[in-house]
Amino acid sequence: MSAAALPSPSGGGVATGAVPRSLAHALANELVLASGMLADLAYDLGSDGDTLRRHMASLQRIDYVTQMQLAIADLLRSVGDEGGIAQVTLQDMADRLRASVAESAAA
């Protein structure tokens, strides 16, 4: 679901419109909180050598997810500002966002 589309209060369908800036910032804060929780979890799991050796790739994916969440938080905070997707440093995520925006614009 795009940042410009939220479930309607009645629960039926999707209402299009801008996400209020205060909600965008609140959502960004929640993503930062969730990222911190995931980072703590990864640190706890990685502190055990056996777990680290067996699950290195999974722990790296947790780190990647936290990076994605932080990038989304930055985008939510900059809604309406210049830059937008160009500010996303995770190239594959930026590519997916551009493709999704282009698809939505074509629909």
Image (cartoon, rainbow, N blue to C red):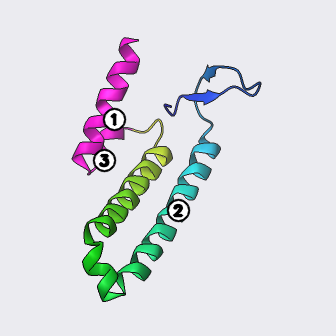
Residue 97 got which mark?
1
- Residue at the disc numbered 2: 34
Secondary structure, magenta segment, majority class = helix
Residue 15 got which mark?
none
Which residue reaches farthest right?
A: 10
Q: Is residue 97 visible?
A: yes
- Out of 11 and 29, give the one closest to the viewer: 11
Name the N-terminal-most of marks 3 and 2.
Answer: 2
Nearer the camera: disc 3 or disc 2: 2
- The structure residue drawn at horizontal position 61% and vertical position 30%, both measured from the top left corner, is 6
Q: Is residue 91 above or below residue 60?
A: above
Q: Are marks 1 and 3 in contact (CB under 8 Å)?
A: yes
> Measured from the top left, where is residue 102 in percent x and y?
32, 22
* Quarter of the image with the C terminus in it: top left
- Residue at the disc numbered 3: 88
- Out of 78 and 66, give the one closest to the viewer: 66
Q: Which residues are magenta?
A: 82-107
- The structure residue drawn at horizontal position 51% and vertical position 69%, both measured from the top left corner, is 37
Q: Tell me if mark 2 has few (under 14), some (14-19) or many (20+) residues whose alpha carbon lies within 10 angstroms of its own.
A: some
Task: Give, as a three-letter code, the residue at label 2.
Answer: Ala
Name the N-terminal-most of marks 1 and 3.
Answer: 3
Task: Give, as a three-letter code, the residue at label 1.
Answer: Leu
Q: Tell me if mark 3 has few (under 14), some (14-19) or many (20+) residues whose alpha carbon lies within 10 angstroms of its own.
A: many
**Alpha carbon separation for disc pair 3 and 2:** 19 Å
Task: Give, as a three-letter code, the residue at label 3.
Answer: Val
Q: Are marks 3 and 2 in contact (CB under 8 Å)?
A: no
Residue 88: say if magenta.
yes
- The structure residue drawn at horizontal position 40% and vertical position 79%, both measured from the top left corner, is 45
Circle 3 — which element? Answer: loop
Q: Is residue 83 visible?
A: no
